[in-house]
Amino acid sequence: MKQSLLAEPRSAASVLRLQFHDCFVNYLNQGCDGSLLLDDTPTMAGEKLALANINSLRSFEVIDKIKAELEQSCPGVVSCADIVIMAARDAVSLTGGPRWEVKLGRLDGLTASRADSDAIMPSPRANATTLIDLFAKLKLSVKDLVALSGSHSIGRARCFSITHRLYDDQTVARQQDAAIEPQFREELMRLCPVNGYQNVTGGLDSTPVVFDNLYFKDLVVGKGVLNSDQTLYTSPETKAYVEEFSRDEEAFFQAFAEGMIKLGDLQSGQPGEVRRNCRVVNGSPAAAMNNYQN
């Protein structure tokens, strides 16, 4: 992870997101099982091209590299699912955030489902009520929701996820959104102009490569980049936690670590394995080809 961050600082946020996008999906049947890492096959539409992931999730090669080194040292022991959990923890601690002990022993799932990912992953347009209901299904509290949203302390967002706050149908400036600080709105409009390139990115908070509580300080002053972030301050159910974490970084760090441990506990008990290659199920034609090439 240190090597990856030195090569590309943005990879920390990318790897952190992998845990969320892996553990959320079909939590009753899959959970944190590395299903997100599986490539599509002729008979399986995997999760990498799901609506929340396509042109968005990155740094799969970081997991590949970690797995390759582990297979050299202790083959068949450490699952890809556990690698995602450990790498996400290290991404946070290496960028200034907390460090916590992670539970290990997860098995890698034998399949993946694009439909399941599309059905559960929250939209950047989501409001607090929708997010609270989703997290409740995962047995995560309102406090967990706000703390884990602090993962946006690092990383960047695409204009694709921002422009709906600024324009109607991407062409006409939307009537002033009272939740957006006026000067910050102008900054966002310069970053994401009418009919601009939707894959342009901007930092999710004022310090997008440092894990800190600036994310919450930004929300308090109306500088949340995504609607799903700013709604945490405008909603009475979540506002108090935003204010607390904006004042007390240590409280945020503690709540975030607790939330990540609970998120990592989302496991199904379904049959699994320890994959040799995180992208393919053991024994598949793709796995056999990979072993032949190696």
Image (tube, helix red, strand yellow):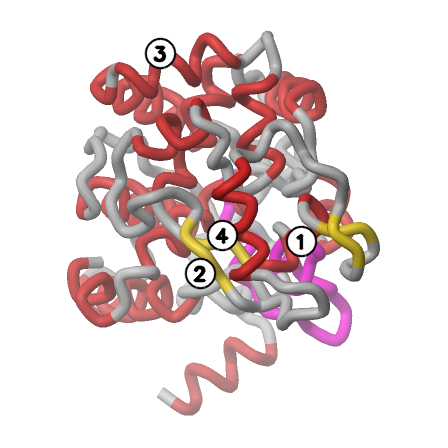
Q: Are marks 1 and 3 in contact (CB under 8 Å)?
A: no
Write down the region rendered in magenta. 32-53
Q: Earlier in the sequence, mark 2 or mark 3?
A: 3
Residue at the location (69% across, 39% down)?
A: 125
Q: Earlier in the sequence, mark 1 or mark 3?
A: 1
Crowd class of label 2 (few under 14; some 14 to 19; many from 20; radius 10 Å) = many
**Kind of residue sitting beneath label 4:** Glu
Depicted 17 relative to depicted 139: above or below: below
> Is disc 1 placed on a helix, strand or loop?
helix
Q: CA distance from mark 4 to mark 3?
A: 27 Å
Depicted 107 relative to depicted 213: above or below: below
**Kind of residue sitting beneath label 1:** Thr
Is residue 136 rendered magenta in the image?
no
Is residue 49 rendered magenta in the image?
yes
Q: Earlier in the sequence, mark 4 or mark 3?
A: 4
Q: Nearer the viewer, mark 1 or mark 4?
A: 4
Residue at the location (41% across, 56% down)?
A: 14
Q: Nearer the viewer, mark 2 or mark 1?
A: 1
Q: Disc 3 marks which residue?
A: 244
Q: Of helix, strand and loop, which mostly describes the magenta segment?
A: loop
Q: Position of residue 161 (x, y in %)?
A: 63, 52
User: Which numbered dot is residue 275?
Assistant: 2
Crowd class of label 4 (few under 14; some 14 to 19; many from 20; radius 10 Å) = few
Q: Earlier in the sequence, mark 4 or mark 2?
A: 4
Q: Position of residue 59 (x, y in %)?
A: 40, 65
**Kind of residue sitting beneath label 2:** Arg
Q: Nearer the viewer, mark 1 or mark 3?
A: 1
Q: Disc 1 marks which residue?
A: 163
